[in-house]
Amino acid sequence: ECVSCLDDFAKPGMITLSCHSYCTECFQRLINTALESETHWPAKCCLNPIPAENILPHLDNATKTKYQQRDAEWSIPTSDRIYCNHANCSTWIPPKHVNSARNFAKCPKCSKRTCTLCRGAYHNGSDCPQDTALQATTNLAEMEGWKRCYSCHAFVEHNKGCRHMTCRCKAQFCYICGDRWKTCSCTDEQLLVMQAQVATRREEAAAQTQRTAAENARREAEAEELRQILQEIAEFERAEDERLAAELEAARIREEAEQRARAEERRRMEEERLAAVHRKFRQLGLELEILSDVQRVLTAERHEFEIEVLKKERQNALDTLSIRHPSEMSTLVAESQRRITESEAKFEQEYQTRLEEERRIEDAYVLELRAHYNGKPEAEYRVRDARDELRESQGKEYRFWDAYRRKQLAAVREGESRKMEALRVKQESERRAVEGRASIDEVERKRRVWAEGKWVEAVIVERGAILMEKEQEDYARGG
């Protein structure tokens, strides 16, 4: 398990340290956080620095390079680090780019030079104003009258001889004005005046040193006197403290005896109180158990009553359907038979009307034919042939009409048959709906019984917890 994200990973995918294990993502985030701020450096686990040999194998090349750079930079004390003085750069300058002899460091990024003494811009051969050692040397040189070589800027002291000086760099100059030799109009008399001034400054410095020593001695004597006074005061205060401590110790012993007596009384009263609390809550626990048993019994009885109610409702619904369905079917059968009979009577009446009309048409047609063929040869045969043709035509029309009649009656019977089938399907659906509702009610009842049982048990547990909490509160309340 990763100690950071708390997810489980395979062991080969974990980074194991001396105290905990990390997944790769969390470990890299830990290292990146340390690389972003020096306050988090070096990377730690349980406040223990993580060794570099445990870190570098799990970093990519860019992060590894950044880690090595941060390690090289932040391992140097802050006061000893040198950063590029240019505001747009501010890059850390490694020690290998520092020229200690000339007191400058060269930035590896922008190649600008930074003074290693004041951390500002390099002075290009001039003295750094923050070089304290050089400043002390300059003050001593000013007092002693030393001169600087115009070529190498080294201090040169005049011990004896004339004003012509030769530096170790072979440069020759005048000791009075410091210019190149034989380029000035100085004289040896001026050298004597300068030496007299140096002697005067030396005497003044020695006198100042003596005055400073005397002042320091006076201050030390005053400090010693003050120390002795403070020591006497401390000894007096210590004696007073010891006297007060003895009095306080006696008072403490008396107070402890009184406290023990009061504590013993409180302990006795507390034992009586705890015994009373125990008796009270034991009685309450017994009453709560009786209440829980009664609640369970009442719940079970109500569930049995609900079962009987559901059974009765289902049977009542089925009984209602068993009474209504036969009546509905009888009514539909009678209505269907009536509509079929009416359709047959309608076509029978239409048939009689059609038959009478055909007979009338035939009689009128025969009369017309006899009138037409009256007195003509074979008149009777011609009338009979024309009448037969008429009867054949009427026979065809009757067959067409009879086919239509049978089709219409079949359609009526088919429609009534579908109505009865639809009624049977509807009645069956109603019976299934009653059974389905009963099944759903039973499932809902069981779910309700289960949920109510859970609720009752949860209430019983909660009441027990509340009673225990109240008991603990009474125990903890104190007298």
Image (cartoon, helix red, strand yellow):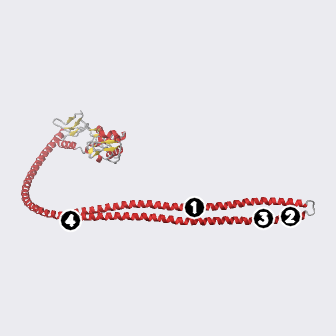
Per the image, label 3 sits on a secondary structure element best described as helix
- Residue indicated by mark 4: 276
Query: Could you say which disc has been placed on residue 424 in the image?
Result: 1
- Residue indicated by mark 2: 366
Q: Inspect the image, locate mark 1, and give the three-letter code of the amino acid beneath it.
A: Arg
Residue drawn where x is 15% and y is 63% of the image: 268
Q: Inspect the image, locate mark 3, and give the three-letter code of the amino acid beneath it.
A: Leu
- Residue indicated by mark 3: 355
- Contact between labelled residues 3 and 1, with CB atoms less than 8 Å apart: no
In the image, residue 198 above or below residue 314:
above
Residue drawn where x is 84% and y is 61% of the image: 387
Q: Earlier in the sequence, mark 1 or mark 3?
A: 3
Q: Earlier in the sequence, mark 1 or mark 2?
A: 2
Q: Quadrant of residue 159?
A: top left
Q: Earlier in the sequence, mark 3 or mark 2?
A: 3
Q: Earlier in the sequence, mark 4 or mark 3?
A: 4
